[in-house]
Amino acid sequence: MNTTSILAKSLPASGAGITGRTNRRRRSFAKSKWPVLVLFLPPALLLFTVLVILPMGEAAWYSFYNWNGYGLPTQWVGWRNYQLVLRNSAFIQALINNGLIILVSLALQIPLALWLATMVTTRIRGALFFRLIFFLPYVLADVAAGMIWRFVYDGDFGLAAGIAHFFGFEAPFLLADRDTAMYAILAVVVWKYFGFHMMLFIAGLQAIDKSVLEAADIDGASGWQKFRLVTLPLLGSTVRLSVFFAVVGSLHLFDMIMPLTGGGPSNATQTIVTFLYNFGVTRMQIGFGSAVGVILFVICVTLAFSYKRIFMRHD
């Protein structure tokens, strides 16, 4: 018997041994997972059910009643609350405002964050200091940011009044004017949240292999060519994630608008969530507000799953 025949006879046995060891490891790993699942999964499912699933189901049920929040709902109105919401001009304005916030976030906030991220990741003096300064607005609470900017925009005693009086003209009341209030809020939104997206881009830039950029330099690529053809494609997953956060976050904007305008003047700065609060909670129209919440939930879920399926399926 030669060496080839000996190896040929020994291969199936060795292969079977390897397969057996692999199966035993898989079974032991599966057995080791069961205690973890039994110990941690039921409490998590219980909390998720009590705090998320049940409130969502209750909101959907209440949306079919004319209910003020006291006692049990008894006055069934069917789809009437949804019809009232969709016919309300303030709700239509809230949808437009949310769309405008998303547009500004995608057109201004994310490009600004990407540009600043590329600047502070280079080896310049004070890069860490600038990262801290740019990220500070995001750390600030939304309500606190709204109160600060309300004072800044104040036409009597705020920073805008001081600048206007310094140059010798009358100070504008930006938040009290229907034509300028939403634009003033959009400026605050860009200032508040661009730091978050900047940190995402910094993390993505630091994950790029430096040898790829060095190869582009050796090939004689300019700064713009290197960014457009090398850096930006390698940041694709980070950009898509940033856009996802910007869109979903824009739909939930509430805390910062309430101290700024409260949805006014004349509903000019309403968003879907402020509309829910102002027209549902404060007016004790819980059925109407629940219908708004269900519509917002459907919009968010549809956008989130559609975006992830279309743009993030390979991430």
Image (spheres, rainbow, N blue to C red):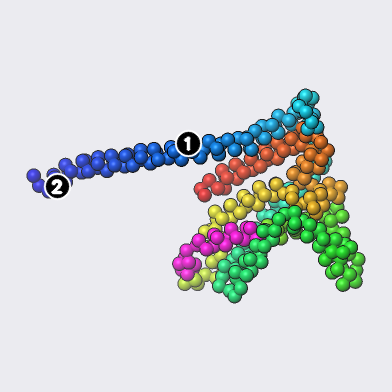
Q: Residues within 10 Å of mark 2 (few under 14, many from 20)?
A: few
Image-quadrant location for residue 17: top left
* Residue 305 horizontal/vertical position (percent): 60, 42
Q: Which mark is residue 220?
A: none
Q: Is residue 216 left or right of residue 22?
A: right
Which residue of the protein is positioned furthest toward the bottom in this rendering?
125
Kind of residue indicated by mark 2: Thr
Q: Residue at x 83, y 46 (%)?
A: 267
- Is residue 112 visible in the rendered image? The answer is no
Q: Which mark is residue 4?
A: 2
Image-quadrant location for residue 59: top right
Q: Residue at x 60, y 70 (%)?
A: 127
- Image marks 2 and 1: residues in contact by CB distance under 8 Å: no
- Label count reads 2
Q: Is residue 24 left or right of residue 158?
A: left
Q: Is residue 122 left or right of residue 163?
A: left
The stretch of residues the image draws in magenta is 194-216
Q: Residue at x 75, y 54 (%)?
A: 143
Residue 19 lies, with reference to residue 193, above or below; the image says: above
Kind of residue indicated by mark 1: Val
Q: Is the N terminus in the top left, top right, bottom left or bottom right quadrant?
A: top left
Q: Which callout, 2 or 1, points at the residue further toward the start of the chain?
A: 2
* Residue 42 horizontal/vertical position (percent): 53, 36
Which residue of the protein is positioned furthest toward the left in this rendering?
1
Q: Callout 2: helix, strand or loop?
A: helix
Q: Which residue is mark 1?
A: 38
* Residue 311 horizontal/vertical position (percent): 57, 48
Q: Is 199 colored magenta in this rendering? A: yes
Q: Residues within 10 Å of mark 1 (few under 14, many from 20)?
A: few
